[in-house]
């Protein structure tokens, strides 16, 4: 166990996402580095100097610990090519993939992305970054290195550093799968390129001293793929982000909320139909507000628009900053958590789940049966999980939550959610790192 009087330990974290990047990917290691100094670590964060972020959130900059050192190194990314192929000046998150039903050039952009840049368009950052970081390792006596992906090119920097300096302890943190990633499977990849992905993944899994995952099923999947050692530390919520005086939900409205991207593979058509059917009751119709924040694909828009009464209750906004999300949660009576409707997504534990737990608002989750999401929600007594084809049971749940809202009650206990506080999770991470 690390003691206060011991010499502080430097640790190098290599990541693509860092403030002012917005979205979910940035928060895992931003929050870990916020609290690691309390447990005797001196984080050094290595990031691209000129990244092509599609989503920015300057409110996250307040979480950068003042003691950590941030190193920046130039990166070249081929997004100009994608923009020319799609005819768009900007490409939002997931837009290249969502455009697969469009014209020839849009489909071509997906094929180019999947077959020309392996494992991803950040590949050109790998060699120069590894060369630069070797001197950083030596001059700072760094023994622990963490790479976090996606983008999985970041792990190839770790592989190069490990080859040149076998004495370092290298942890490859996977926020999402690699060869089992549902997004990768939709990129029209040739069999030759697929084998290349698998080969690179195997090299990382076998060379890293340990693989860190975001949940138990993901950790088991990496172990089955050949990882030498696996562990998981989930994402979480930061108690300092939550208002000390919680805002009460709007008493005049039964607010159903989702924050984040809604794609054609995350489109709960049965839920929209059920909500529309319930709107045949005038009291429910008057009370309902469906509040969707984030990028919404044309398929989702069309699906909701096909239900006339539900469409009249829809409120949308393109985005909110992270310091506003808990206000959105607090206004809500039911929080939607939608897992991608693909077998490759069953092991993923989105960070949003833990923010929902921290907000202590009932959760309606839709995904695969028996996944880690449903187990955590059940263990915490925080809501209920359903499958995409659920019907009467889903309708019954919504009606129960609606009646609980009308009566001012609720049965959910939100048991032991404090274990998902980012500070507690960082303590768990620190203890594990010291054991390697």
Image: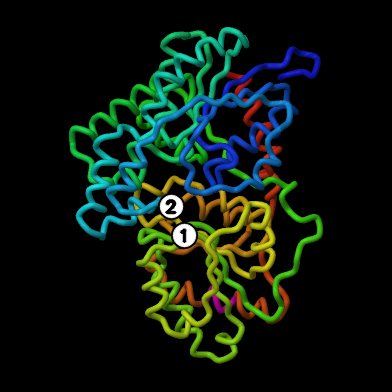
Q: Is residue 399 above or below residue 203?
A: below
Image point 40% across, 64% down: which residue? 267
User: Is 298 displayed left or right of 280 in the figure?
Assistant: left
The reply to whether discs 2 and 1 touch (Cβ–Cβ < 8 Å) is: yes
Instruction: Give the image quarter of residue 329.
Output: bottom right
Residue range highlighted in magenta: 396-400
Residue 92: assigned label: 2
Farthest residue in the bottom direction? 282
Instruction: Give the image quarter of residue 356.
Output: bottom right
Residue 418 located within the stretch drawn in magenta: no
- Work out whether mark 2 precedes mark 1 in sequence or the reverse, and give the earlier one: 2
Q: Main secondary structure of the magenta part?
A: helix
**Percent coordinates x, y for residue 431 in the rendering:** 65, 25
Q: Is residue 95 above or below residue 120?
A: below
**Percent coordinates x, y for residue 345 in the rendering:** 40, 49
User: Is 45 displayed left or right of 389 in the figure?
Assistant: right
Closer-to-camera residue (231/358) = 358
Q: Nearer the viewer, mark 2 or mark 1?
A: 2
User: Is 76 displayed left or right of 381 in the figure?
Assistant: left
Residue 295: assigned label: 1
* Residue density around tag 1, few if under 14, some if 14–19, many if 20 or more, within 10 Å: some
Closer-to-camera residue (183/180) = 183
């Amino acid at each position: 166990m690390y003691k206060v009087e011991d010499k502080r330990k430097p640790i190098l974290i290599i990541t693509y996402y860092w403030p002012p990047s917005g979205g979910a990917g940035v928060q895992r290691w931003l929050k870990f580095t916020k609290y690691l100094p309390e447990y005797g670590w001196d984080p050094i964060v290595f990031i691209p100097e000129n990244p092509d972020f599609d989503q920015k959130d300057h409110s996250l900059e307040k979480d950068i610990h003042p003691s950590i050192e941030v190193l920046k190194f130039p990166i070249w990314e081929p997004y100009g090519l994608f923009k020319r192929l799609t005819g768009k000046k900007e490409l939002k998150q997931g837009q290249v993939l969502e455009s697969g039903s469009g014209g020839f050039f849009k489909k071509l952009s997906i094929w180019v992305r999947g077959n020309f840049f392996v494992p991803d368009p950040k590949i050109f950052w790998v060699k120069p970054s590894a060369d630069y970081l070797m001197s950083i390792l030596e001059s700072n006596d760094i023994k622990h290195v963490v790479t976090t992906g996606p983008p999985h090119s970041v792990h190839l920097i770790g592989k190069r550093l490990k080859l040149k300096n076998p004495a370092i302890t290298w942890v490859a943190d996977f926020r999402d799968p690699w060869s089992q990633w549902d997004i990768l499977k939709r990129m029209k990849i040739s069999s030759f390129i697929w084998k290349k992905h698998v080969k690179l993944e195997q090299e990382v899994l076998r060379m890293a001293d340990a693989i860190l995952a975001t949940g138990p099923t993901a950790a088991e999947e990496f172990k089955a793929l050949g990882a030498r050692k696996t562990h998981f530390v989930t994402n979480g919520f930061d108690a300092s982000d939550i208002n000390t005086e919680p805002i009460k939900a709007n008493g005049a409205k039964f607010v159903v909320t989702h924050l984040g991207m809604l794609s054609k593979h995350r489109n709960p058509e049965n839920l929209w139909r059920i909500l529309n059917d319930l709107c045949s009751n005038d009291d429910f119709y008057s009370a309902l507000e469906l509040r969707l924040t984030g990028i919404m694909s044309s398929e989702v828009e069309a699906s909701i628009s096909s239900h006339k009464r539900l469409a009249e209750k829809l409120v949308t906004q393109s985005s909110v900053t992270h310091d506003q999300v808990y206000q959105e949660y607090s206004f809500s009576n039911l929080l939607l958590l939608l897992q991608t409707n693909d077998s490759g997504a069953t092991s993923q534990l989105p960070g949003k789940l833990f923010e929902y737990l921290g907000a202590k608002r009932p959760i309606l989750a839709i995904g695969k049966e028996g996944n880690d999401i449903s187990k955590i929600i059940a263990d915490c007594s925080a809501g209920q999980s359903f499958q995409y084809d659920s019907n009467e049971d889903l309708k019954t749940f919504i009606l129960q939550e609606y009646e609980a809202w009308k009566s001012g009650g609720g049965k959910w206990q939100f048991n032991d959610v404090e274990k998902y506080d980012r500070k507690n999770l960082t303590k768990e991470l620190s203890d594990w790192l010291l054991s390697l």
